[in-house]
Amino acid sequence: KNEVEQSPQNLTAQEGEFITINCSYSVGISALHWLQQHPGGGIVSLFMLSSGKKKHGRLIATINIQEKHSSPHITASHPRDSAVYICAVSLGGTYKYIFGTGTRLKVLA
Amino acid sequence: NAGVTQTPKFQVLKTGQSMTLQCAQDMNHEYMSWYRQDPGMGLRLIHYSVGAGITDQGEVPNGYNVSRSTTEDFPLRLLSAAPSQTSVYFCASSYLGGTPYNSPLHFGNGTRLTVT
């Protein structure tokens, strides 16, 4: 079992749809990071969560520390949201990160 | 600001050859790290550093060496390339001040390495 699991692996949506992706982890963490990998391969950090809610444009994410889960959602999806969304956790007490395999999102016009 | 700069963008090596992947950042970040990204797998940590002269192993360190002589540079050396090292390599850095481990990672654009 991977220590960081994401679902779904692939997601296709129509423009304007509300989208939810999921990340679960099984280790102690100091923070959870959401990253975006563009079709060209570059990786950008969207935000980090150790509690509560964060927002990046139309992407809003919360973290449930007790359930070890984060489910960001995108409101009014747009083709420019098409990317791979990667969940990463920074392991508590270390300088190490563990990454999920990503959710590949394609938004059709 | 250039951010995190990786060179080269593409490289083809023959089995047994050695090479160095370069990574430089101009943000005065203490933390620098190397990852490899393989199909169907998440990014995996190879080595990391929390400051000049300090390095440590990550999840998949075998076959790779690193050094950190300056804050800006963190090169990754492949000692004797093997086909299993065919991958996309990313360098990332972050600030360690304030709350440790909770600063965003800044990634380079990656190096696509093929070993034949």
Image (cartoon, coloured by chain):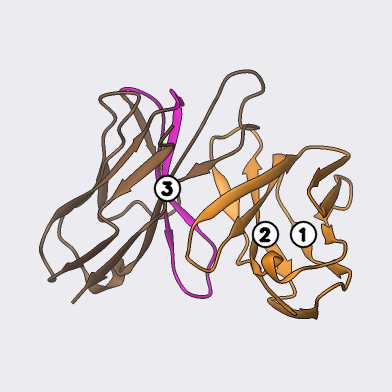
Q: What residue is disc 2 on? A: A4
The residue under the point 87% across, 73% down is: A17
Q: Residue tagged by mark 1?
A: A24
Task: Determine if residue B116 is in view.
Answer: yes
Quarter of image, res A85: bottom right
Q: Is residue A2 above or below residue A34?
A: below
Q: Which residue shows up at 33% across the image and 22% down it? A: B52
Residues in magenta, as a range: B27-52
Residue B65, quarter of the rendered image: top left
Identify which amino acid the numbered label 1 is placed on.
Answer: Ser
Between the C-alphas of marks 2 and 1, the distance is 6 Å
- How far, Cα to Cα, is label 3 from label 1? 26 Å
Q: Which amino acid, mark 3?
A: Gly
Colour used to depict chain A in the structure image: orange
Distance, label 2 to label 3, CA atoms, is: 23 Å
Looking at the rendering, which quadrant does residue B60 occupy? bottom left
The reply to whether the magenta stretch includes residue A76 is: no
